[in-house]
């Protein structure tokens, strides 16, 4: 059901985006009635290309035949994901289209599309144990000032094949190129080799927690000349906070165009109430916990005493 | 069915955690112990952050001991005056413990400290209990009656100042030792998520010479109040009390305890103590092994608590 309505939507979105006014008018209402998922057709360039990226070079190696530049437009199926008490993860669909696509057909692999979904950057401490008199003790640690809490990559091919390390580094694509710098002071305390070991451990542990993931081989698939789609599955333990989905269009190993869309990931319902309660009113929450414990203890024993009679 | 825990921030299987509460409840009903020393390590093995396991454990203990404490009070088995002294000490100890939890978490040594505390206390208590129970089983077989408590003996405890008269216990002793015992138990409660009955009961019997008839009631009295205060302090300072997790454990626990009590009635006291000692030592060895075995991953990651 969801897959079907989603398919409707990107058909609509693509039609609108390609600038065909008539198609846009016709498919608009169809889109609205076909899906619970809203896909506003994005025309504003405000969201595109955040300030952290330099403007993409607009002079590709081989200029397109008509002299027009390909641009990528992407959006997400769900603008906000709700973390409730029964949250067990969520799948988001990142989809879009390439304007002025020169690709003859979907199997030509003329373009590469890479989707990177990142969570909020947060400080993380990495600790290392060593053997102290027979007991394994945390003896050294490095604080990384801002590490994306979540990082998922989906691409038409493995990213190493899509572009060279310099390009990937520039756009922070791939685990090795995630921008994470040690907090001030730690750079002096450890040498580069040790810092690299800490960084590698951080990436490895995040991968073990399923928080740094590479989506399966067909992470991004083309349907037709310009439409593409990609599913990113957020695990149950995904840290709550806004997510940013960056979509890159590659041709001949260079980024031709990029787009940004955002997903909010929020606690809702009982989940939100309890979490806010615990963190905003800790005293009242503590009293509540104690009273709840006393009452449930008394209730249970009263119940079993009656049963025993 | 899975449920997302708001404080532990993980999705857990309801059935697994209910049956875990049930199993611990069964054992605590069987042996007549609080079960905190089993529950907290079990939660940590299940992947619950150790600070959350400890904080939530204290809430679960309030629920599991409150009805017992009231029943003991009704039967006049609580020395309230002694209890108040123990609670007063316990609150101070708990406050110090909760503060220490915060510091240890910030410097990344909390897990180590919890494990070391568990190995030390479980090793000592389990070892002593094992020796004692083997002794009584042997004596029971050879037919000699176990020696009763020696009364009227004076020790260094009786030479301390601030003497108080504890009518219910028929004692005239200094308030300092009970306050210190209470403080120590409160400190342990905050750090380890245990009620501390396994330390308090022997201490009251052997150090204070409180009559066995009031020991259980009085220690339960202390546990309920001190654990309630500990729950509150953990919620305020460390924000590590997960009510959803606690409710799961409480429900499982009360059900399990009913069966445990029935099963326990069929076993002799010294046999029970022998089995309990074995269980305590097993938990101790399991935690100890993790401390000394070469870990497969020497790195760990965590959020930055406090300043950078």
Image (cartoon, coloured by chain):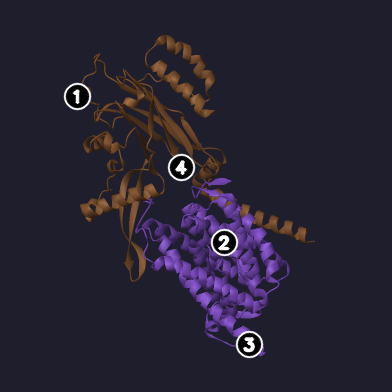
Chain colours: A brown, B purple
Q: Mark 1: few, some, or many residues within 10 Å (few <14, many ≥20)?
A: few
Q: CA distance from mark 3 to mark 2?
A: 38 Å
Q: Could you confirm whether marks 1 and 3 are on the same chain?
A: no
Q: Could you confirm whether marks 4 and 1 are on the same chain?
A: yes
Residue A235 badge: 4
Tell me which chain the residue with mark 1 is part of: A
Residue bearing mark 3: B139
Q: Mark 3: few, some, or many residues within 10 Å (few <14, many ≥20)?
A: few
Residue bearing mark 1: A61
Instruction: Give SS at disc 1.
Output: loop
Question: Residue A220 lies in what quarter of the image?
Answer: top left
Q: Could you confirm whether marks 3 and 2 are on the same chain?
A: yes
B176 over B235 or under it: above or below: below
Q: CA distance from mark 2 to mark 1?
A: 71 Å
**Nearest to the observer: residue A79 or residue A189:** A79
Q: Position of residue A107 (x, y in %)?
A: 34, 26
Tell me which chain the residue with mark 3 is part of: B
Q: Are marks 3 and 4 in contact (CB under 8 Å)?
A: no
Q: Are marks 4 and 1 in contact (CB under 8 Å)?
A: no
Q: CA distance from mark 3 to mark 4?
A: 59 Å
Image quadrant occupied by the N terminus of chain A: top right
Residue bearing mark 2: B227
Instruction: Give SS at disc 4.
Output: loop
Q: Position of residue A46 (x, y in %)?
A: 34, 23
Residue A192 appearing in the image: yes
Residue at the location (49% across, 64% down)?
B192
Residue at the location (41% across, 46% down)?
A210
Residue at the location (59% across, 61% down)?
B61
């Amino acid at each position: 059901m969801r897959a079907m309505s989603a398919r409707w939507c990107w058909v609509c979105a693509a039609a609108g985006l390609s600038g065909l006014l008539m198609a846009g008018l016709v498919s608009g209402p169809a889109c609205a009635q076909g899906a619970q998922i809203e896909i506003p057709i994005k025309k504003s360039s405000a969201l595109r290309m955040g300030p952290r990226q330099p403007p993409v070079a607009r002079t590709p190696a081989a200029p397109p035949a008509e002299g027009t530049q390909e641009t990528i437009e992407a959006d997400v199926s769900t603008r906000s994901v709700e973390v409730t008490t029964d949250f067990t993860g969520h799948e988001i669909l990142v989809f879009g289209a390439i304007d002025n696509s020169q690709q003859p057909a979907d199997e030509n692999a003329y373009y590469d599309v890479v989707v990177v979904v990142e969570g909020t950057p947060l400080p993380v401490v990495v600790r290392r144990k060593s053997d102290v008199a027979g007991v394994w003790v945390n003896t050294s640690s490095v604080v990384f000032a801002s590490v994306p809490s979540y990082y998922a990559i989906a691409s038409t091919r493995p990213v190493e094949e899509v572009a060279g390390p310099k390009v990937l580094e520039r756009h922070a694509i791939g685990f090795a190129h995630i921008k994470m710098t040690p907090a001030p002071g730690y750079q002096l305390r450890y040498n580069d080799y040790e810092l690299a070991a800490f960084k590698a451990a951080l990436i490895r542990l995040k991968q073990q927690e399923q928080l740094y993931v590479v989506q399966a081989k067909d992470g991004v698939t083309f349907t037709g000349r310009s439409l593409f789609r990609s599913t990113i599955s957020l695990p149950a333990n995904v840290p709550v906070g806004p997510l940013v989905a960056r979509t890159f269009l590659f041709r001949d190993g260079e980024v031709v165009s990029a787009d940004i869309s955002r997903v909010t990931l929020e606690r809702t319902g009982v989940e939100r109430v309890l979490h806010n309660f615990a963190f905003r009113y800790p005293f009242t929450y503590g009293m509540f916990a104690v009273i709840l414990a006393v009452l449930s203890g008394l209730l249970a024993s009263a119940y079993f005493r009656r049963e025993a009679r | 069915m899975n449920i997302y825990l708001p404080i532990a921030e993980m999705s857990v299987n309801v059935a697994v955690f209910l049956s875990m509460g049930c199993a611990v409840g069964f054992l605590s009903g069987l042996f007549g112990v609080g079960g905190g020393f089993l529950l907290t390590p079990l939660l940590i093995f299940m992947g619950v952050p150790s600070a959350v396991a400890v904080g939530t454990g204290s809430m679960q203990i309030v629920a599991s001991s409150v009805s017992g404490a009231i029943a003991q009070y009704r039967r006049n088995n609580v020395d309230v005056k002694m209890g108040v002294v123990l609670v007063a000490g316990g609150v101070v100890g708990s406050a110090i413990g909760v503060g220490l939890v915060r510091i240890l978490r910030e410097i990344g040594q909390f897990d180590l400290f919890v494990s070391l505390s568990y190995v030390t206390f479980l090793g000592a208590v389990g070892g002593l209990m094992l020796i004692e129970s083997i002794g009584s089983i042997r004596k029971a077989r050879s037919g000699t009656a176990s020696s009763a408590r020696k009364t009227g003996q004076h020790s260094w405890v009786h030479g301390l100042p601030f003497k108080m008269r504890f009518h219910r216990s028929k004692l005239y002793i200094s308030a300092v030792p009970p306050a210190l015992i209470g403080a120590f138990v409160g400190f342990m409660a905050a750090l380890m998520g245990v009620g501390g009955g396994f330390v308090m009961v022997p201490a009251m019997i052997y150090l204070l010479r409180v009559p066995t008839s009031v020991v259980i009631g009085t220690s339960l009295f202390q546990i309920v109040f001190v654990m309630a205060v500990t729950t509150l302090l953990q919620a305020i300072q460390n924000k590590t009390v997960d009510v959803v997790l606690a409710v799961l454990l409480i429900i499982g626990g009360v059900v399990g305890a009913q069966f445990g009590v029935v099963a326990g009635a069929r076993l002799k006291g010294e046999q029970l103590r022998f089995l309990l000692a074995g269980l305590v030592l097993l938990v101790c060895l399991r935690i100890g092994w993790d401390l000394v075995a070469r870990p497969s991953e020497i790195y760990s990651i965590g959020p930055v608590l406090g300043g950078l």
